[in-house]
Image (cartoon, rainbow, N blue to C red):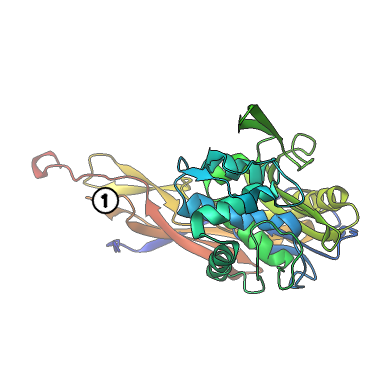
Amino acid sequence: MRRPACFLLVVIACLSWPGQARAAAEPDLTATAAVLMEAGTGQLLYDRRAGAELPPASTTKVLTAILALELGRLDAPVKVSRYAAATPGASIYLQTGEVLPLIDLVKGALINSGNDAAVAIAESLAGTEADFAWLMNRKARQLGAYHTHFVNPNGLPAPGHYTTARDLALMARYGLGNSLFRRLVATVSDQIPAPDGWRYLYNTNRLLGTYPGADGVKTGTTDAAGQCLVASATRQGRQLIAVVLGSCDRYADTRALLDYGFNSLYAEAAAAGEPVAQVYVKNGVTTSVAVTPAMTVGYTVTMAKAALLEKRILLPAYVKAPVHRGDELGRVQILFQGQEVASTALVAARDVAARPIFKR
């Protein structure tokens, strides 16, 4: 870690307070369990029975797709087994012996919610559904989803197949960090080859194209689970994840959650990779270097408490060249009521070489 050879200055960033506070009435939902999460920081903004272990239906495929994208070769040919082709429920109508690339099966599972596609993915990566379920449960633990246990890749009702609204939000947040996953869950329609032409895929998430900023993620419906939805939406660079399980109207519930997050809550954040300040570089080939947060940090409160949020940027008066990209040069803090609630290092955004001695 680079240690600046001079004293620290504290710069307090002015809070861009949104104006007169509005009442933050919590949404009225029909769902058995629900959560609202800041995608950038993971902060939980709303919690209704977030830890209740419930059947998730096809929202299970969020984790199936994550494993496929991480463990599989997307162009690898997958031969559909008789067992996969006979999978009941939502289907992309795979045929026994048909061969498709793995990526087309991921599209079929995420966009069209094909149960048969999910089984074909599981068999291609692990040999059997049971072995793939073991991989799913291991990945869930790695993500902090400690109240999840899956026994199949598609969410068809089965004893011991359950998760929680909070765990699904964690899985979705992780998946949205993958650019291909992010693109697929925001796809309204697509097509993949079929033995006699094309299969046309239509996203089962009706928020896409109807709710401003909606960009994912996955629906799920069974008699046991009721209406389920993992959704995300992004406005002005701020992304929220909403999860509802056991809902009577998943779209109304999700809209209410997202509206609450965007309209009644205020977030002060510093995004990873976005320049926040400049530091003077002594004897450098350029006179300054931009600094960016090493990771995204932030904190969200109700509008009524927005004035109690504060962002502090701590920087040295100068640093000496050379400077290397990634050198820690300062720190950014988020404070609430004067207490630090989040912070991260500020690092150099690029290299700055030292000027030759004869030019100083």
Query: Who's the residue at 38% across and 54% down the image?
Result: 347
Query: Who's the residue at 77% across and 63% down the image?
Result: 157
Image height of 199 relative to 7, above or below: above
Query: Who's the residue at 80% across and 36% down the image?
Result: 210
Which amino acid type corresponds to the residue marked 1 in the rendered image? Val
Q: Give the farthest residue toward the left.
A: 358
Label 1's element? loop
Image height of 219 relative to 244, above or below: above
Q: Position of residue 207 (x, y in %)?
A: 78, 41
Query: Who's the residue at 57% across and 39% down the image?
Result: 98
Q: Position of residue 17 (x, y in %)?
A: 70, 50
Dot 1 alpha-carbon crowd within 10 angstroms: few under 14, some 14 to 19, many 20 or more = many
Foreground pick, 116 / 39 = 116
- Residue occupied by mark 1: 323
Q: Quadrant of residue 298?
A: bottom right
114 sits left or right of 5 in the view: right
85 sits left or right of 343 in the view: right
